[in-house]
Image: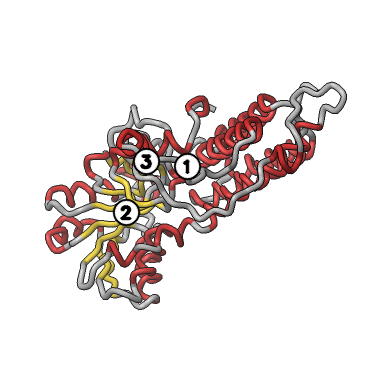
Amino acid sequence: MATDPLNVANQRIVETLASRLRRRQVVGSRETALETVLVLRQVISKVRFSNIDQLVEIIRSVGRKLVEAQPKEHTVGNTVRKVLHHIREEYHTASQGTAVVSTSKDTLSIAKFVLQGQPRKQNVPQKTTLNESHGMLKENDADDPDAFARTLKPVLMEAIQDVLDELETVYDNISKNAKDHIHSDEIILTIGKSSTVEAFLKAAAPYRKYTVIVADTAPSYRGHDMAQSLSSAGISTVLVPDSSIYALMSRINKVMLGAHAILANGGMFAITGSLLAATAARAHSTPVVVCAGQFKLTPQWNLYHEYGALDFADPSSVLGFEEGNLVDKVDVVNPFYDYVRPELIDAFITNDGDHPPSSVYRLIKEAYDDEDYEL
């Protein structure tokens, strides 16, 4: 084996995505996650390895390069951790010769219910085990070094396709129960333009008549695009300035927010203005609901920034350089994301059901392996 398992083609693929991430040519959590999965799939399909440790280290090295290229896009690291989790699952399944999906012999006990929660029924067709279709796994085979990779790769491709399918259908899976969360004649407040919240609100429109108040989210003014999109879908929409949020909150039935990243303690990074809306909602006892895919679950903590994330936009949009006398005397900070504490959030609506902030740690435990928290 070469000292660098990544061949030239794989290095070029990884460096291309890393360069696009650095230049912000790939923007948005879902788009970033999709690009990361596609790159990992190409790397695994072309790379050579003779045991599982080599494969894991290769994926981790790719993940480190991509995370270093754009550390503010948390979904890059989350996607790498998810793929590593699936790789280990498929390897253990193949090594033990067990079925991929659990059988009906699993019994439900109070202890299992407390530890794992209510079991979810999945109508997944039973897969043949790798041992049955490709023979036994042989690691570090001196006679045929590529035998292990050749045997395991088809199963890994299926696992990665599952991750890709989950990302591609995340909006539909989150929105499928929208009519159960939104009721007729409700007034809902949202901030900025979140694709997840947009799909969720549009999914409920055929079943419910309600009004959405959209804050314009200065200085980016992404709320304008959101209001136009919802209005074109036939939803009663009102665009208001950010300064009106507290005054209107007494009339609001529900606040719906998107998330950039959901942290391990149940807090989240969200577009600027989300903290303002969540704080006003708490003062009026208005429920705050966050719509986000599980690929945004991040096994990290916000230890250093009480109100904002470490990502800043152009300060000139807040205070232009034409204000020369004032610019020289002040430091202008334009944070791109707010940090919203878990006590300000009532529920997360994900593609795997609804969860309170206190359950986020359990979801992270199920989605990622402990050794991958630090890539």
Mark found first going from the N terminus, 1 or 2: 1
Q: Secondary structure at mark 2?
A: strand
Residue drawn at point x = 60 percent, y = 44 percent: 36
Label 1 neighbourhood size at 10 Å, few (<14), some (14-19), many (20+)? Answer: few
- Return the x and y of residue 222 as percentages of the image width and height: 38, 59
Residue type pointed to by label 2: Leu
Could you say which disc has been placed on residue 108 in the image? 3
Residue 250 seen: yes
Instruction: Report which quarter residue 208 is drawn in.
Output: bottom left
Label 3 neighbourhood size at 10 Å, few (<14), some (14-19), many (20+)? Answer: few
- Return the x and y of residue 71 as percentages of the image width and height: 50, 35
Q: CA distance from mark 1 to mark 2?
A: 41 Å
Q: Secondary structure at mark 3?
A: loop
Residue type pointed to by label 1: Lys
Q: Nearer the viewer, residue 77 or 116?
A: 116
Could you say which disc has been placed on residue 105 in the image? 1
The quarter of the picture where the C terminus appears is top right
Determine which residue is flagged by label 2.
257
Mark found first going from the N terminus, 2 or 3: 3
Residue type pointed to by label 3: Leu
